[in-house]
Image: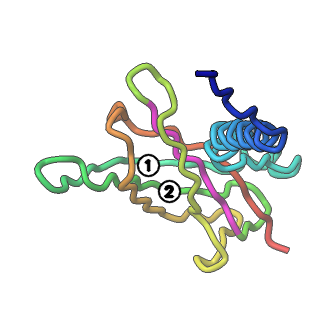
Amino acid sequence: MASKKQPALSNAVIITVIIGVMALTGGFWYYQKVAHAGPAIVMLTPDAKAYVKSLQITDSDMKAHEGFAGVTGVVEITGKIKNAGERPLDMVEIYCNFYDSYRQLVLRERVPIVSVKMGGLKPGETKPFRLAFDTIPASWNQTMPGLVIAQMQFKN
């Protein structure tokens, strides 16, 4: 009995397989590099960088409120921001940087502490702020997060 040869793969099938592998590789790369890149960091304008020294964050405090089964539910950060400069502000946002016990960043949240809706921040004025966080990773070291000015807009 003569042996039967398996039909050879056609060029179309080979090309389809190669394109599929390339698409999967590209999708995997995109998912790893772009989708997990996190929010873009907006740099302060030169005017804002010079003005940062005029903003003072004081009286910052942290309270953790227990959630279900004794697990930390909501972490509340309170404090005050003072405009010690001469320019009125419409908006100020800060980064709240949460770290683990090795001082590695585990969460960076960008939040507004001054907005037009809140009335802005006039020269010499101090305003309180309150921030609530409920999605902090369990690896957080339970210490006060770093508070860093992320963005500001001057009143027009």
Q: Position of residue 63 (x, y in %)?
A: 29, 50
What residue is at 72 percent from the left and 46 percent from the top? 41
Residue beneath label 1, please? 59
What residue is at 45 percent from the left and 39 percent from the top? 145
| Residue 21, picture quadrant | top right
| Residue 71 falls inside the magenta stretch | no
Q: Residue 80, which numbered label?
A: 2
Q: Is residue 61 above or below residue 101?
A: below
Mark 1 touching mark 2, by CB under 8 A?
A: yes
Other-residue count near label 2 (Cα within 10 Å), few / some / many at <14 / 14–19 / ≥20:
some
What's the residue type where badge 1 is placed? Asp
What residue is at 45 percent from the left and 32 percent from the top? 99
What's the residue type where badge 2 is placed? Lys
Disc 1 from disc 2: Cα separation? 6 Å
Describe the element under mark 1 as helix, strand or loop.
Answer: strand
Other-residue count near label 1 (Cα within 10 Å), few / some / many at <14 / 14–19 / ≥20:
few
Q: Position of residue 82 (x, y in %)?
A: 60, 57
Residue nearest the viewer, comparing 122 with 112: 112
Residue nearest the viewer, comparing 107 with 81: 107
Describe the element under mark 2 as helix, strand or loop.
Answer: strand
Q: Which residues are magenta?
A: 91-99
Residue occupying the far right of the picture: 46
Q: Is residue 28 above or below residue 87?
A: above
| Residue 96 falls inside the magenta stretch | yes
